[in-house]
Amino acid sequence: MGDLQGLFPGVYKGKRCHSSPDADDGRASCSLDAVPMHDEMLLRLSLALLPAFALATIDLGVKAVFPTSRWDFHQRSHAWSILAVALLAVVLPLALLPSRLVAVAAGIVAGGVLGNVVSAHRHGGRVPNPIVIGAVALNLADAFVLVGVPVLVFALARVSIRNREHIDRLIPPRRWELALRRRLGL
């Protein structure tokens, strides 16, 4: 558990031992105390959820207000919907990592994915794309995902680099990684 404390500070408080009043032998039982989420973790979670819902709402509003030609709808399968919901389930917990930038970027990506999932559900598996630029049709949700993913990748790399000593304890670096770090002066 000590290794996880560095990556998720404040989640684990430590051991708590107490003796059971009905135990005849006087043995104490010990358990790990899980501390409720900090204010910082709640802030990061809200930094992901608020943009996600706000951006999905904006996307759905644009799709409702601006007309979309029949050929500017993209058909989505049930497998796409399942994968998109799975992506939401993976992206949103990233807000628990110790980075506000990761939380905001995860919220932007989640907002785009959520907007397209709700649109597909509302239109029988078809996603409207009211923004047409030349031969390309897209919607705001697509733009949110296209902007959010590179920011999320950058933010995750930043968190990984800043917390590499904790990661190294969980997954020791290989020889070539150590040699590369020495060469780069890291």
Image (cartoon, rainbow, N blue to C red):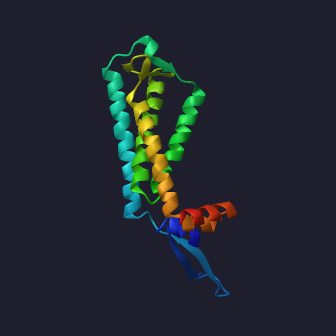
Q: Is residue 47 above or below residue 60?
A: below
Determine the image quadrant of residue 54: top left
Determine the image quadrant of residue 39: bottom left
The quarter of the picture where the N terminus appears is bottom right
Q: Residue furthest top?
A: 70
Number of marks in the image? 0
Residue sitting at 38 percent across and 20 percent down? 133
Q: Is residue 49 visible?
A: yes
Q: Residue furthest left?
A: 65
Q: Position of residue 185 (x, y in %)?
A: 53, 66
Residue sitting at 64 percent across and 83 percent down? 23
Q: Is residue 64 left or right of residue 135?
A: left
Determine the image quadrant of residue 20: bottom right
Q: Is residue 66 left or right of residue 124?
A: left
Q: Position of residue 38 (x, y in %)?
A: 40, 64
Residue sitting at 39 percent across and 58 percent down? 42
Q: Is residue 186 above or below residue 50?
A: below
Residue sitting at 30 percent across and 21 percent down? 65
Q: Position of residue 82 (x, y in %)?
A: 57, 34
Residue nearest the viewer, comparing 71 with 93: 71
Residue nearest the viewer, comparing 13 with 133: 133
Q: Is residue 1 visible?
A: no
Q: Is residue 183 left or right of residue 50?
A: right
Q: Position of residue 43 (x, y in %)?
A: 36, 57
